[in-house]
Amino acid sequence: DSNDIKPVLKFLKKNYASPNIEYYGQAKGKNIIIIHLESFQQFMIDYKWKGEEVTPNLNKLYHASDTISFDNFFNQVGQGKTADAELMLENSLYGLPEGSAMVTDGTTNTFQSAPALLEQKLGYTTASFHGDVPSFWNRDNAYKSFGYQYFFSKDYLPKVKDEDMGYGVKDKLFLKESAYYLEQLPQPFYAKLITVSNHYPYIIDKKNTSIKSWNTGDSTVDHYVQTARYLDESVGELLNYLDSTGLRKNTMLVLYGDHYGISNNHKAAIAQILGKKSVDNYDLAMFQKVPFMINMEGLKGGVNHTYGGEIDVLPTIEDLLGISSNKYVQFGQDLLSKNRNQIVPFRNGDWVTNKYTKYNGDYYYTSSGKEIKSPTKAQKAEFAKIQKYVTTDLGLSDKVVNGDLLRFYKLKGFKTVNKKSYSYTLKNG
Ligand code: GP9
Ligand code: MN
């Protein structure tokens, strides 16, 4: 009942990280374009294969003086993969320990999501774009709960020959066609572009191949480098287009990788790709890093080393927009805040902090990767304290989702989203 939200509010109040005044409100009035980089991992940034940069466009953006890039940003998804990433980014709520919350609860739950908040508080137009069928991951229902005004799925994209590659319309076509819709949205807009081509099993046709595959001998892994290159070229083309139309000027770009592309079942291949003899649990934990970048003209950029993850994105965006999230039921902390706890929970209860890493039951020093085989008494106490935070954080988020607790939480000046007022089906004629 409505009392169940009380421990949640108490926990969030205690762990609220106040905004960094240097950045607070810096993005006020800007369009926001979120670019979802499918299965794209942080190690690919500046990675070279046969002496050649694999992702020159993303590398350039990563190092640009008006980009804040994060090099200790982790994916925190569970079985819901893409859907968990979307749920975290849009709600600062974790996916569930099993299954996909967007599927099991996306239709029925009450949410106070980014699209609805930005529309109601700041008058944003909101749209999500995806080159797959609208029902995948229950997007067509969950997006209504999130308050998305528009959902441009595959149905809205022109049918052309060989348009599909893997999980939907190939990225170059998808981003090109989506940009035409984007331009027509009333500004300011909040738009999310979900790419698909860099998805297992990394299918790519000859025409779009511009780099040799890896040769680890693990055929499920080897083509990743080629689809990652294709993703990079696709993003490069989109950025050129945004530049040429002038849209880039008044837009804040947010790019993120949703989760690993290469799973921990491929240790030998991972070692080869990283140029190591073998990989341990520390390497595998660090392999969960994904890119997170914020780019905007005039933004004071640089590589930020704070430890964070997908749960932290929404509070970061809110502070950049100047809408303080201290009354919101959101489990992350602004990545730009100076008083973050720097604890990154993984969905299975493992974690990384700026000091220690716990992964698959092993403990390490985060900066050196040295294993802590016999922790001191003081270290054991530190681990226990971190673990308690992680377990509580995940557990309370699960309570919110499983108990649909946001239906009891009145946010001042915010009207409950009316799911029935949205329709994403294309009318004939
Ligand atoms: C499907 C696409 C892939 O629509 O978003 O989802 P994933 O398999 O990465 O969760
Ligand atoms: Mn995905």
Image (cartoon, rainbow, N blue to C red):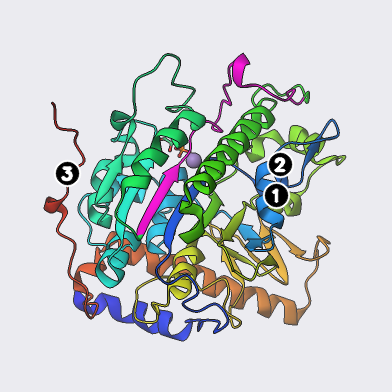
Q: Local crowd at mark 3 within 10 Å, few (<14), some, or many (≥20)?
A: some
Residue at x-position 81% and y-position 60%? 369
Q: Amino acid at mark 3?
A: Ser
Disc 1 to disc 2, C-alpha distance: 6 Å
Instruction: Give percent across and percent down for residue 393.
Output: 46, 70
Q: Is residue 190 left or right of residue 385?
A: left
Q: Is residue 201 magenta?
A: yes
Instruction: Give percent across and percent down for residue 180.
Output: 38, 39
Q: Local crowd at mark 1 within 10 Å, few (<14), some, or many (≥20)?
A: some
Residue at x-position 74% and y-position 82%? 378
Q: Quadrant of residue 417?
A: bottom left
Tell me which segment is drawn in magenta. 189-214
Return the disc, 2 or 3, that comes first in the chain's sequence: 2
Q: Amino acid at mark 2?
A: Pro
* Residue under label 1: 60
Quadrant containing the C terminus is top left
Q: Secondary structure at mark 2?
A: helix
Q: Is residue 339 left or right of residue 278?
A: left
Instruction: Give percent across and percent down for residue 426.
Output: 19, 33
For the question of whether residue 287 can be seen, the reply is no
Q: Secondary structure at mark 1?
A: helix
Q: Amino acid at mark 1?
A: Lys
Whether residues under marks 1 and 2 lie with C-beta atoms below 8 angstroms apart, the answer is yes
Whether residues under marks 2 and 3 lie with C-beta atoms below 8 angstroms apart, the answer is no
Quadrant containing the N terminus is bottom left
Of residue 296 and residue 285, the one placed in the foreground of this image is 296
Instruction: Give percent across and percent down for residue 414.
Output: 22, 73
Q: Quadrant of residue 341?
A: bottom right
* Residue under label 2: 56
Q: Local crowd at mark 2 within 10 Å, few (<14), some, or many (≥20)?
A: some
Asked if disc 3 is less than 8 Å from ligand 1, the answer is: no
Please tell me the numbered disc located at residue 423.
3
